[in-house]
Amino acid sequence: MYFSGREKVAMVRLRDPREEDVKPGSPDSVLSSEGNPFVYSTDALSRLRSQNTDWQQIPTYRMPMEDLVNEFGEITICRLVAENLFVVPSNKWRGSSVQGRWQTGPTNSPLDRSGGGDIHSETFLKNPQYLIDISGNVEVMIQLLQYLDLDGLDTPSSNNINLLIGFHVIKVENNRATRLHKLWPHCTVIVVEGHKRKREIVYRGTLSEGRYVLVPSSYRQGEHSSFFLRIFSKAVLLNIKELKEDVPKSRIPCSCIIPEVELVTVVVVDCAIIEHKSQTWSSSKLNVYCALTCEGTTVKTDVSKEESNPVWNSSFIFYRKKPNKPIIVKVFNKNILFPDELIGECELPAAVTHGPTPLDACLFPRTKTSEDSDNPSIGTIHLCVLTEDNLMAV
């Protein structure tokens, strides 16, 4: 509002976004001196008091534009995800979010979740981990925002300096459901968002189909802070799931009924070479995929359009309770109207290797036995097998 003969001053209206839940003037209020993450100069505070006589008791106040420019170094303009029903679906961003915390606790316990930002250190994977599944090539935006949870375990410091924060996105096995303990060659780091001393950092890019583990981290090991993690996509709603378990939990606690897990095996299915094409197959063109069966659990790769040299480059993890029982690998031809046809199969004993071991296995129309030594090979499948008796090594 302007008055005749008075100087015009540009003002900015500021409001506590939590005014409905936080009582003005309380330690949790953004406008109070105890909980305020911003420190203003004495001149700016004196002008605020002169313009708002009871400024600490109200959730809304105004600041001159000159003070805003002098006192703040960065402004973030936030735009919420469009929820309008009339928005074109292709232009509508969908978001998922989760809250987490970096904290220290007993070693290898669920409270030990502050491993630092050095991806080459042994403690890096002690940070919180989150699972994301991507179908097809999807453009995503990932936001990591740090904050002080004044209602929880965070204690505001005197200087309120932001931590150096960053995150890594790692492509993992297609069926992983437990925490990642070591970065083997088959676990590819896709995104590295370097550590910055900012309240929030954002990555925007495209991720290919697969399963990913997102690891947010602070730069130094042992730092404490809460964070807010969000992921947006235009294609589909991407769910974020925190990985809490180090190894799969048995549904039946009694080990005398169901044996405990003894080995963990990772099988990387690289590619195959189909040397002989059977004349009995119903389709002239092959749509090849690979299926692996371990102790009753079956997983499958995507369908490859390459007939003679299908490439999958997929990895799978198995927690094995029966080490003497082999893993069955089968290659099928995908049909639409008829049942899928078996091209060839082989068995993997998958003994303990303590490291990735390349393996070229021959495919037979059915499992080769000593009584059927003349059973011809129909091709070769290229694998890489890693088996550990230490369940925390993969």
Image (tube, rainbow, N blue to C red):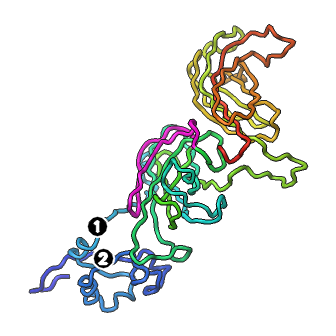
Q: Amino acid at mark 1?
A: Gly
Quadrant holding the C terminus:
top right
In the figure, is residue 172 to the left or right of 63? right
Q: Amino acid at mark 2?
A: Arg
Percent from the top left, x then y, of residue 314? Answer: 60, 32
Which residue does the image show at 71% across and 17% down from the upper left?
Answer: 363
Badge 1 density bin: few <14, some 14–19, many ≥20, Cα 10 Å: few
Q: What segment is highlighted magenta in the picture?
A: 183-211
Could you say which quadrant of the image residue 320 lies in? top right
> Does 210 appear in magenta?
yes
Residue 182 versus residue 34: which sits nearer the camera?
A: 182
Q: Main secondary structure of the magenta part?
A: strand
Percent from the top left, x then y, of residue 204? Answer: 41, 48
In the figure, is residue 127 to the left or right of 220? right
Residue under label 2, please give it. 13
Q: Give the spatial CA distance, label 2 vs label 1.
A: 18 Å
